[in-house]
Image: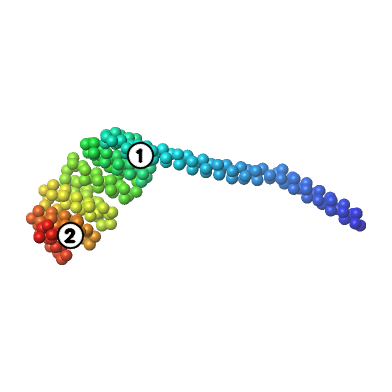
Amino acid sequence: MSNNESFIDEVSEEVRRDRLYGAFRRYGWIGVLVVLLVVGGTAWTQYSAARDRAVAEARGDALLDALDRPEPEGRAEALAQIEEAGASRAVVGFLTADAQVEAGDAAAGVATLRTVADDGEVGQLYRELALLKALMLDEEMPPAERAQALGGLGQPGAPFRLVALEQQAFALVEAGDTEGALAVLQGLLEDAEVTRGLRDRASALIVSLGGEIGGQGNDLPPSLE
């Protein structure tokens, strides 16, 4: 009886071994594939990170090289060749426009800023700042049109609302619309978010335009008393 049990155990063990080998031959490639995918994925991740780091370093070097150029013309030309994305592209655009204006080409600076303002891949904050700077620099634009565009940037909740309204008042004065300018300036004085410096400038402009400073808390700045 003992020999029979031993024989049965040996046969069962052989059967299990054969089944195991058969399963490995049939499905073992799956495990090998999983290992290859894990190893390959790790290698690709490391390669991608190294590639992205190299690209970022190259762009950073190009930016520093452009900014180190003493002449604004050369600086503007070098900056215009740098390819960036998103917020970085907006910053490069601002730097390029500054160099173009410094080189005496305000029209090119305005065009660069308008390109940033129209870029749908750039954040709204950068786009509005670019448009504001473009409007402030665009001497070829009729003052009435500039005032209207600045009014759009002066809507409640806009990030550069107060600056845009101050510039709108200047544009209205240039367009000969004194009453419109006074209305904008008076609105600034009544704005709870207006800074002391802007309040003083608005008050001075109101007085210079022959207007009166009304409302509580709108005292004349010391220079006008």
- From this viewpoint, is residue 91 visible? yes
Image quadrant of residue 185?
Answer: bottom left
Residue that sits furthest to the left in the current view: 210
Name the residue at 14% across, 59% down: 221
- Say what secondary structure mark 1 lies in: helix
Residue that sits furthest to the bottom in the current view: 216
Give the label, 2 or 1, closer to the camera.
1
**Which mark is on residue 189?**
2
Circle 2 packing at 10 Å, graded few (<14), some (14-19), many (20+), is: many
**Mark toward the start of the polypeptide (2 vs 1):** 1
Name the residue at 17% across, 43% down: 142
Name the residue type under label 1. Leu
Which residue occupies the foreground of this view, 140 or 137? 137
Name the residue type under label 2. Leu
- Say what secondary structure mark 2 lies in: helix
Taking the image as shown, residue 178 lies to the left or right of residue 158, namely: left
Which residue occupies the foreground of this view, 75 or 176? 75
Name the residue at 30% across, 35% down: 69
**Which mark is on residue 64?**
1
Taking the image as shown, residue 34 lies to the left or right of residue 153, namely: right
Taking the image as shown, residue 173 lies to the left or right of residue 95, namely: left
Q: Is residue 58 above or below residue 190?
A: above
Which residue occupies the foreground of this view, 105 or 154? 105
Q: Is residue 52 above or below residue 217?
A: above
Q: Position of residue 103 (x, y in %)?
A: 24, 36
Circle 1 packing at 10 Å, graded few (<14), some (14-19), many (20+), is: few
Q: Position of residue 10 (x, y in %)?
A: 84, 51
Q: Position of residue 155 (x, y in %)?
A: 24, 55
Which residue occupies the foreground of this view, 61 or 29? 61
**Which mark is on residue 202?**
none
- From this viewpoint, is residue 115 visible? no
